Image (cartoon, rainbow, N blue to C red):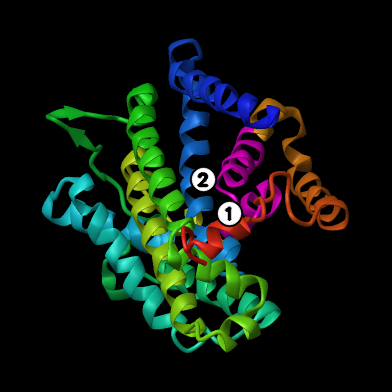
Amino acid sequence: MKPAAGRIKKPAYGAIILLWLIAPLFIGKYWTDVLNNVAIYALLGLSLNIILGYGGMFHMGHAAFYAIGAYTTAIINTAWGVPVLWLMPLAGLAAGLFALVVARPIIHLRGDYLLIVTIGMVEIVRIALINNVFDITGGANGIFGISSPTVFGFRINGIVAPAHYFYLVTAFLAITIVLFYLLENSRFGRALKFLCSDEVAAEGSGINTAGYKLAAFVIGAVWAGMTGTLYASKMGFISPESFSFWESVVMFMIVILGGSGNIAGVLLGAALIIGLPEIFQGLQQYRLLIFGLALMIMMIFRPQGILPPKPRSYPIDKLEKNEVSL
């Protein structure tokens, strides 16, 4: 017989999903746009969760991958008119290749050292964009005139009709959740969690820790790059200021506050960090102070986040029968 908590969870999740899907029918354009931002940051949080939550790597430069994906889309779309949704895989590929190049020499770093290097990485990318590198990034003014996405011949303008864009980004979010859930429960995901909890023991067990960490870095970067395409097509223009160090801080807080290593926790973190300040707009000037206090309180009283991942259990009888794999 299933425990009571398990019987309650499924209807609760179903109700939340239903409310999310019908919300644009009852709220105005402004709040629908807020939901769009929550969904975009949920995607960024989930991509960072692969690196931070599963891989245990303190990465504070995720905005660099987000920027590379957005700029790849903007440059090719405005120069050659390629539809933005066609450019999503290319944006992910560009961000993934960049991650592969920069992460390879630093992947052996741990804790604070990796954190500092990744902070430098995002600043280098931002300064390169401001200085109009290769004369294609538009400098401080950015790039204007990015097309809206088109689905079956229907143009989706994220500013004029945020409800239409809402269902596009929700579809991508749903696909991401399913894929990341499968990845979390795959052999690759279990190996990542193992090395996150004890890297020395994982290495002693024969796991190629450097290879797994590099793969996690690249997967997270690819997803952040593709999310950059969604952002660029929603806004119609991008500038370096949209990809500052602060963006990396927000993504980091979403994962830490919600629950590092837990998909539901990351979604909750995105709703709290992006959605809640819109409700308390009168306190906007105290935003940084409130975020800082929230992080301090979480680190002291609940460092695992609001919704931490549940430890995986392996029944002894099933292990003896080889019905589950570690």
Please, what is the three-letter code of the amino acid marked with disc 1?
Met
Residue, disc 2 = 41
Q: Residue at x 50, y 56 (%)?
A: 241
The image position of residue 220, as x and y in percent, is: 44, 62
Give the magenta range: 246-275
Residue 310 visible in rendering: yes
Please, what is the three-letter code of the amino acid marked with disc 2?
Tyr
Q: Quadrant of residue 284?
A: top right
Q: Are marks 2 and 1 in contact (CB under 8 Å)?
A: yes
Residue 93 is left or right of residue 298, and the answer is: left
Residue 251 numbered mark, or none: 1
The image position of residue 18, as x and y in percent, is: 48, 19
Of callouts 2 and 1, the N-terminal one: 2
22 or 78: nearer the viewer: 22
Q: Secondary structure at mark 1?
A: helix
Principal SS element in the magenta part?
Answer: helix
165 or 243: nearer the viewer: 165
Residue 140 is left or right of residue 111, and the answer is: left
Q: Residue at x 63, y 49 (%)?
A: 254
Q: Is residue 184 above or below residue 177?
A: below
Q: Residue at x 20, y 29 (%)?
A: 155
Q: Is residue 38 above or below residue 223?
A: above
Badge count: 2
In the rendered structure, does residue 265 fall within the stretch colored magenta?
yes
Alpha carbon separation for disc pair 2 and 1: 7 Å
Category of crowding for the residue at label 2, using alpha-carbon neighbours closer than 10 angstroms: few (below 14), some (14–19), many (at least 20) = many
Q: Is residue 59 above or below residue 74?
A: below
